[in-house]
Amino acid sequence: AKGKVTNFLEKILKEIAIDIVYTCGSKRLAKHIRNLQKKYNFLAFVSLEEHMACGIGACKGCVCKTKDGYKRVCKEGPVFPVEEVIFND
């Protein structure tokens, strides 16, 4: 099969109910998963990839913007509910 993984996922979501989706990789993919989540009502989590200079949260070099403020990917993550993460468009 050829095409985008998001198109394939939406085809599956139309056919069967899915409870949860985990994603990693591009933020563009995570944003699309968030849109599908709103449409098909499933849980979704994203594993974020950020540069982690210290790995213990001290440098705050790996922060991501969330609905509750900035969070450190190395300490509070790297997995977050997709609806909490604010992706810059």
Image (cartoon, helix red, strand yellow):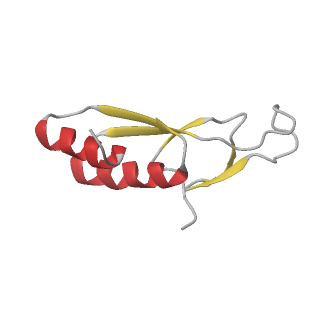
Indicate the position of residue 7 as horizontal and vertical percent values: 28, 49
Q: Nearer the viewer, residue 10 or 82?
A: 10
In the image, taking residue 54 as reference, residue 33 lies left or right, namely left
Looking at the image, which residue is at 27% across and 42% down?
Answer: 8
Q: Nearer the viewer, residue 24 or 58?
A: 24
Q: Residue furthest left?
A: 15
In the image, taking residue 86 as reference, residue 33 lies left or right, namely left
Q: Is residue 66 visible?
A: yes
Indicate the position of residue 69 as horizontal and vertical percent values: 64, 56
Indicate the position of residue 44 as horizontal and vertical percent values: 39, 39
Quarter holding the N terminus? top left
Say how many tags the image has. 0
Quadrant of the rendered structure where residue 20 is? Answer: top left
In the image, taking residue 2 as reference, residue 23 lies left or right, namely right
Quarter holding the C terminus? bottom right
Looking at the image, which residue is at 55% across and 59% down?
Answer: 87
Q: Residue furthest front?
A: 2
Q: Is residue 83 visible?
A: no
Quadrant of the rendered structure where residue 25 is? Answer: top right
Quadrant of the rendered structure where residue 79 is? Answer: top right
Looking at the image, which residue is at 46% across and 46% down?
Answer: 82
Q: Residue furthest bottom?
A: 89
